[in-house]
Amino acid sequence: MSALPSQKFPHRQWDVFCRVVDNFGDIGVCWRLASQLAANGQRVRLWVDDASALTWMAPEGAAGVDVRRWGALPAAHEPASDVLVEAFGCEIAPEFIAACVNQVSAGAKKPVWINLEYLSAEPWVGRHHGLPSPVLHGPAAGWTKWFYYPGFGEDTGGLLRERGLMECVQAFDRDVWRRQQGGDAPTQGERWVSLFCYEPPALVDWLQQCEQAVAEPTRLLVTAGRAQRAVCAARQKILGQIGPQRLSGKPEQLHILNLDARPQPAYDELLWACDLNFVRGEDSLVRALWAGEPLVWHIYPQDDGAHGPKLEAFLDWLQAPPGLRHFHAVWNGLAPGPLPVVNAEVLQNWGACMRAARTRLLLQNDLLTQLLGFCESKR
């Protein structure tokens, strides 16, 4: 599928709605979508109930993106909505919808109403992508929402990928970036690993595997927040098991560097710089795919177990080798036993898998290009 030139689309007024459930995933995806829309000439209002994460995720904001408080309404003189995006199952306040209905009654064109869903590689996604959902209740009864599913196949809405991303990845100087990092001087031959996670059951096992590595020391770069707290708890657990001595007789085998919270572009560079990336949720998974380096996904755990089939579907699409599949199962608590050993040969194998998957994705149109075309087709 050839890429469509996004600049051919008319400039519209987009209203993107986000309610923060996970502090980073929901707002992270919505911010990338909003900023990419604005970069392509669209006018964007981002309505969010908790914008606090944007203070470090996007401290400089983005030209053309207007962050608004959830529950507020546009002023009377502001342009009517051309596109409404309900992200991840949030529901737009009835008062906002009523205002849209009033504008339509006054002559504005009815907005295209998008229900932007979570990312999944499961087969049913392609069948549901683009389906209508009649609005049966409320001030806009009789209108239509449209399901929009991000995804990995050509029958889905694609993945967010800004223009020039691959050129940035290719031009990135990993050695310079690594020299710029603080902490102890890197050890020759270290493998660099980023860690962004919830509380993976196998984290203790992973730290011990790094500590006991024979050939390759590990520099573990731990993201701020839950990942750092999880590492701290895991180390306490290890110390409780082995006593108040050092974690091993070879402390140089594992160097841990706790990172500050960083803007999205800086997080992307972290992914490009590492030999292995542990990611969580949705946004960081997609960014790690574009990095093309080996990754392990800590999928958001759900009480009904829905995360298990979702993870399996992703690994099927990825064409993951058996070792990578088993590592994911143990990391996510879906299989018992120790983690498979990750050495240089394993990383090389996983890296080849990731780069092949990235190549397949690059043959498809990105989410923004497809979404712009979809909305124009519904006006």
Image: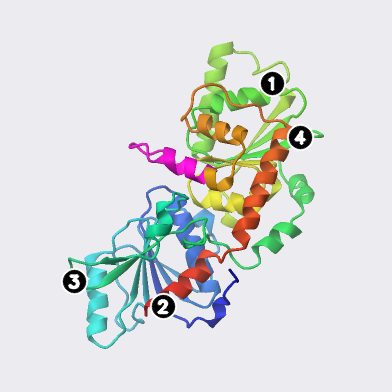
Q: Give the Cα distance between marks 2 and 4.
A: 51 Å
Which residue corresponds to the image point at 45% horizontal and 51% vertical from the top-left? 120
Q: Give the Cα distance between marks 4 and 1.
A: 14 Å
**Other-residue count near label 1 (Cα within 10 Å), few / some / many at <14 / 14–19 / ≥20:** some
> Which is in the foreground here, disc 2 or disc 4?
2
Residue hosting label 3 = 139
Which residue corresponds to the image point at 61% horizontal and 32% vertical from the top-left? 323
Given the image, on which type of amino acid does mark 2 rest? Answer: Ser
The reply to whether discs 2 and 4 touch (Cβ–Cβ < 8 Å) is no
Q: Give the Cα distance between marks 3 and 1.
A: 63 Å
N-terminal of the two: label 2 or label 4?
A: 4
The image's mark for residue 291 is: none
Secondary structure under badge 2?
helix
Residue hosting label 4 = 190
Q: Position of residue 243 (x, y in %)?
A: 58, 11
Looking at the rendering, the stretch of residues picked out in magenta corresponds to 300-315
Q: Relative to 379, is 161 on the left or the right?
A: right
Which residue reaches farthest top? 243
The image's mark for residue 212 is: 1
Secondary structure under badge 1?
loop
Which residue corresponds to the image point at 75% horizontal and 45% vertical from the top-left? 178
Secondary structure under badge 4?
loop
Which residue corresponds to the image point at 33% horizontal and 37% vertical from the top-left? 304
Q: Is 304 contained in the magenta span?
A: yes
The image's mark for residue 377 is: 2
The reply to whether discs 4 and 1 touch (Cβ–Cβ < 8 Å) is no
Q: Is 177 contained in the magenta span?
A: no
Given the image, on which type of amino acid does mark 3 rest? Answer: Pro
Q: Is 360 in front, or is 229?
A: 360
